[in-house]
């Protein structure tokens, strides 16, 4: 991906600013002469910023402006250990809203829409980002937050929500509930804006069909504003990224070297305008690739593929790299298999054992499916797997991100 002149200028300005005052990056970039950075290649030699660096700066060590300029903080989910806290200035909050409103516009959402927001509000950035963008656009926000499915569906019917914002697993749960209760004709949804979880084609089709909506993938992470830094367009061929606010690279997760356009790697983000907590070469651990060429929609914003997984979801079995997205793709080629699965890796008697739990549609012969899925897995992914069919709804649905690959070997 070629860095534009404007991006280069903004990055240089930011680097000068950050190294000239007491802050996180003054120390991180100690000993680096900013004058010597004269090209994209020079920039690519700067050290990466890791989530661990951000954690070490807890609580407010990332702040690059005086305290009185901070208007808000958010925190990324600290399921293990110390959370990361990101401070925002008023300008950061506004920039985020501008980007988010642009996402809604890309999805064809207007001020006439009624937007039901189911991601959580609070320390993490999801709900409030959807809200900010919605208000900036001028649409009607319905700030539900997660859970309470009865109330969600009641409001959806009574208010005639036209847009659903949700994680893919919660959208699926709602779609299944609507089908189960037979209330499809009372639902007015037209579009779904689905948050940054990796999800397969089959799951997408089930949600789209059962809800009768067009789906848009929105991308973002708390460390870099939150959701809303990129979204898919009506052509659904990757997500356009707002490259006037962020500069992104795709690097080999092992070596850290940028990969050629089109190849899969880890998304690395540098913020161009952020004030509260600017980031230089932040390793997101999200796997994607640049989609080369122009989008048929005519948007000048560059595209990346929908998120293909996390670098830590990538598991190696008998020398073969396995991504969850490969399993999604494999299952979507098999009629009767649902999009929901869990892949377990265990080590027994000196051998790696792989087990695939997969939901089957009702009335499908389990033994035949075991055989078909096992053979397809071997053919497409290259390893032998024990297939364990289960009924639709038996695997956990989550309101947040669902984990599908479990490595129990160590
Ligand atoms: Zn497009």
Image (cartoon, grey):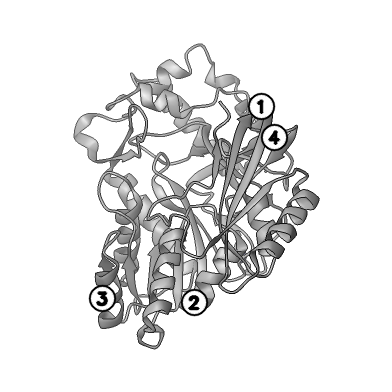
Measuring 45% from the left and 66% from the top, which residue is drawn there?
Answer: 172
Q: How far apart are marks 3 and 4 (CA)?
A: 46 Å
Which quadrant of the structure image shows residue 80?
top left
| Label located before the other in sequence (3 or 4) | 3
Quarter of the picture holding the C terminus? top right
> Which residue corresponds to mark 3?
155
Picture coordinates of residue 43, whole percent (x, y): 60, 28
Q: How far apart are marks 4 and 1 (CA)?
A: 15 Å
Q: How far apart are marks 2 and 3 (CA)?
A: 18 Å
Picture coordinates of residue 326, whole percent (x, y): 68, 51
Measuring 55% from the left and 66% from the top, which residue is drawn there?
Answer: 204
Taking depth in this image into account, of 206 and 284 the one nearest to the observer is 206
Neighbor class of circle 3 (other Cα within 10 Å; few <14, some 14-19, many 20+) is: some
| Label located before the other in sequence (1 or 3) | 3
Q: Is residue 211 above or below residue 382?
A: below
Measuring 36% from the left and 84% from the top, which residue is drawn there?
Answer: 183
> Which residue corresponds to mark 4?
317
**Ligand 1 quadrant assignment:** bottom right
Disc 1 or disc 3, which is closer to the eye? 1
């Amino acid at each position: 991906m070629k860095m534009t002149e404007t991006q280069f200028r903004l990055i240089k300005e930011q680097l000068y600013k950050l190294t000239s005052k007491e802050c996180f990056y003054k120390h991180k970039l100690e000993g680096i002469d900013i004058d010597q950075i004269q090209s994209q290649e020079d920039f690519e030699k700067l050290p990466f910023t890791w989530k661990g660096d951000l954690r070490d700066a807890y609580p407010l060590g990332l702040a690059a402006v005086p305290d009185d300029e901070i208007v808000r903080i958010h925190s990324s989910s600290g399921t293990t250990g110390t959370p990361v806290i990101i401070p925002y200035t008023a300008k950061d909050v506004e920039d985020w809203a501008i980007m988010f409103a642009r996402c809604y516009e890309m999805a064809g959402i207007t001020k006439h829409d009624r937007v039901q927001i189911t991601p959580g509000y609070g320390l993490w950035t999801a709900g409030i980002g959807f809200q900010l963008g919605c208000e900036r656009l001028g649409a009607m926000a319905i700030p539900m937050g997660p859970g309470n499915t009865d109330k969600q569906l009641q409001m959806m019917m009574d208010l005639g929500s036209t847009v659903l914002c949700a994680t893919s697993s919660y959208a699926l749960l709602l779609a299944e509930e609507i089908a189960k209760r037979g209330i499809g004709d009372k639902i007015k949804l037209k579009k779904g804006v689905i948050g940054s979880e990796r999800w397969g084609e089959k799951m997408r089709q089930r949600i789209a069909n059962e809800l009768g909506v067009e789906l848009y993938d929105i991308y973002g992470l708390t460390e870099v504003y939150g959701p809303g830094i990129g979204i898919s367009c009506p052509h659904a061929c990757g997500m356009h990224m707002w490259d006037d606010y962020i500069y992104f690279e795709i690097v080999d997760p092992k070596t850290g070297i940028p990969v050629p356009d089109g190849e899969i790697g880890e998304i690395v983000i540098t913020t161009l305008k952020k004030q509260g907590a600017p980031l230089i070469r932040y390793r997101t651990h999200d796997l994607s690739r640049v989609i080369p060429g122009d989008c048929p929609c005519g948007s000048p914003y560059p595209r990346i593929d929908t998120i293909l997984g996390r670098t830590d979801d990538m598991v190696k079995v008998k020398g073969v790299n396995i991504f969850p997205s490969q399993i999604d793709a494999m299952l979507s080629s098999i009629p009767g298999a649902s999009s929901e699965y869990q892949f377990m890796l265990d080590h027994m008697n000196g051998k790696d054992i792989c087990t695939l739990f997969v939901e089957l549609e009702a009335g499908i012969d389990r033994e035949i499916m075991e055989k078909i899925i096992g053979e397809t897995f071997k053919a497409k992914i290259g390893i032998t797997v024990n297939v364990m069919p289960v009924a639709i709804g038996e695997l956990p649905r989550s309101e947040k991100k669902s984990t599908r690959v479990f490595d129990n070997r160590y």
